[in-house]
Image (cartoon, coloured by chain):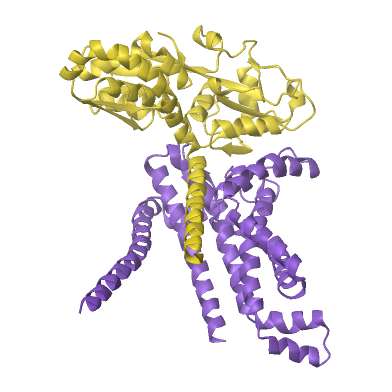
Chain colours: A purple, B yellow
Amino acid sequence: MNRHKLETVVHGIFLIMGLITIACVLLITIYLVIAGIPAIREIGIVDFLFGEEWASTAAEPKFGILPFILTSIYGTAGAMLIGVPIGFMTAVFTAKVAPFKVRMIIEEAVSLLAGIPSVVYGLVGMLVLVPGIRELFDIPDGASLFAAIIVLAIMTLPSIINVSLTALEAVPKEYEEASLALGATEIETYFRVSVPAAKSGIAAAVVLGVGRAIGEAMAVMMVSGNAPNMPSLFESVRFLTTAVASEMSYSSGLQRQALFSIALVLFMFIMMINAALNFLMKRDKEN
Amino acid sequence: MKKSLALILSGLMAVSVLAGCSSSTEETTAAASEAETTTAAAADAETEAETEAETEAESEAEALSGAVATDGSTSMESVIGILGESFMQEYPDVTFTYNPTGSGSGITAVQEGRCDIGLSSRALKDEEVESGLKGETLCLDGIAIIVNPENPVEDLSIEQIGKMYTGEITNWSEVGGNDEEIVLIGREAGSGTRDGFESITGTEDACQYRQELTSTGDVITTVSQNPSAIGYASLSSISDSVKAITVEGVEATEDTVRDGSYKIQRPFVLVTKDGEELSPQAQAFYDYAMSSDVADLIAQAGAVAIH
C-alpha cells in the first residue's frame, strides 16, 4: 500500500518535471509571437521581410531585414561549405581509419572544441582572425562575412563530427566485412558502403551544424562588423541574431518591437531546421 | 562510488555551462552593464559618504518619501543611474525611477507633467525655454576621437570628421595621413555616444559605418587593431592602446571640456518647469544632483562634473 503511494508520488514528480520543460517552450513561443507580431503589422510584412534598408533610429526609420536574412543564410551556407567536408572527413577518419590512440586524441580535441564558450571564439577572432584577414587580402578592414564564416565553420565542427561519428559507428560490421570479402579496398568500403549506410545520420549532423551556425550571436557579433549592409564576402554585415543582440540594450518603441519581430523570424528558421532534423532522425530509426 | 563520481562530474559540467552562459550574456549587454559596474564601483565611495551623511540626513530622510520620476536621454543612463542609486541609499523611503526614452520625449514629459525632472543631453531650444521650461546643466560629456597609434594624423576639424563619417573623405591622405582607406568605427543605433557624436558633427543618419560595435571597449580594441581606423568613445574610457587626436587644435581632457574649448562635447541637462515648485523629494534629488558632493560619482559615470 505504502509502496504504491510512494510510486504515485514519484510518478507525479517526474510528470511535473516533464511539464516544466514543455511549459518553458510554450511560454517562449507564445511570448515571441505576441511580442513579434505588432511591429510586423505596423511595418507591413512585405516591407519588413523584403526591405533592403535598416535604419532603426533615423528620423524616418526604416525596418527592412532582408540584409539580415540573407546574411544569416549566406553565412550559414558558407560555414557549411567549409565545415562539412572537414567535419565529415574527420568523422570517417576517426571512426574507421585512425588507430586507437589517435582516435582518443581526436575525440578529446573535438569535445574540448565543443566546450569553448562562444565569446572566446569571438575574442580570438577579433584579435587574430580579423587583423589577419585584413592583411592577407589587403582590404581596409577584416571584420566581414568571411571572418564570420570561418568562426562559424570552426564552431560547427564538433556537432558535425560527433553526430556523423555516431552514425558511422552504428553501421553493422557485416556490411563492411562483406564488402572487404568481395575484394573492395578499405577506402572503397568506407566510402561506398559505410557512408551510404550512415547517410541520414550524417545529414542530421549537417542540419545540427546549420542550427548551431544560424543561432550563434556572440562570436559572430565580434567579427562581422555589424553594419546593416547587403551581404558581400569582404563587407561588414549583420546577422539576424546580432541584429537583435546589438540594438536591444538601448532600444525603445517600434525599434524594440521590431527587434522582437526579428527574433520571431529567427525562431521560425530554427523551427524549420528542427523539423528537418526530426524528419531525418525518424527516417534513420525506421531504416 | 562510480555513481557519485558521475554525479559530481555532471554537477561540475552544469556549473561550467552556467558560467559560460552568464559570461556571454554579460558580453551582449556589456553596454548596459557598463553603467551597473560603475555603480558597483561607486558603492565604495557611497559607504564613505553614507557614514557622514547618515547622521545629518536621518531626521530629514524620515520626512521624505514618495517617488521621484525622471524621464529622458538614454545617454544619461549611467550618470543618472549612479546618482539615483546613491540618492535612494540616503533616502530609503524615496523611490527613484528613470525612464530612458530620449531627450525629446523627456522634455515633452516635463511639459505634460508626466515626470518630475526631464533629462536632456542637449541644451534646451529657445522655443522650449519660451514654453516655460528651465534647463540647468548637470555635467558635461566629452567624446574623444580616437585613431590607431601608428596613424600620423594628429589633428582634425569637426568639418573633416563629419566629411569622413559621411563618406566624402575616404582616404587618410586627404587629411595629411598615409595613403589608406579610412575605416569608420562607430556604435550601435540607440547608443548615447553615437547620438552625441552624430549630432555634434552634423552627421545624423548619414554615417557610412564600416563597423557598428556594442561597447566602448570593443571600439577601442578594434581601433587599436587597425591602423586605418577611426572611432569615437567617451572621454573617460580612453586607454593607451589608441591615440586621441586633437580637434581643431584642442586636446580632449576634462579641463578643455569644462572650459568649452574642446568642441565635441554636449551638456547633460536637468529640465524642470520654470516657476513651478517640485515635490519635496524631487527638489531634494535636484539639489543633491547639483551639489558638489556628487562630483566623484559623476566622474565615475564617465562625465565631467562642473559643480
* Image: A248 above or below A115: above
Nearest the viewer among B25 and B290 is B25
At a point 80% along the width and 44% down the height, the residue shown is: A136
Q: Relative to B248, is A9 on the left or the right?
A: left
Q: Relative to B257, is B291 on the left or the right?
A: left
Q: Is residue B267 visible?
A: no
Q: Is residue B76 visible?
A: yes
Q: Which quadrant of the view contains residue B40? A: top left
Nearest the viewer among A194 and B109 is A194
The furthest residue to the left: B63
Total numbered badges shown on the rendered structure: 0
Nearest the viewer among A147 and B246 is A147
Q: Could you say where residue A14 lies in the image, as x and y percent from the top left?
A: 33, 69
* Image: B52 above or below B198: above
At a point 48% along the width and 33% down the height, the residue shown is: B191
The furthest residue to the front: B1
Q: Which quadrant of the view contains residue B208? A: top right
Q: Could you say where residue B247 lies in the image, as x and y percent from the top left?
A: 62, 15
Q: Can you say which quadrant of the picture contains the N terminus of chain A?
A: bottom left
Q: Could you say where residue B106 lies in the image, as x and y percent from the top left?
A: 33, 27
* Image: B105 above or below B47: below
Q: Can you say which quadrant of the picture contains the C terminus of chain A?
A: bottom right
Q: Relative to A221, is B177 on the left or the right?
A: right
Q: Could you say where residue B62 lies in the image, as x and y percent from the top left?
A: 17, 19
Q: Relative to B292, is A108 on the left or the right?
A: right
Q: Which quadrant of the view contains residue B217? A: top right
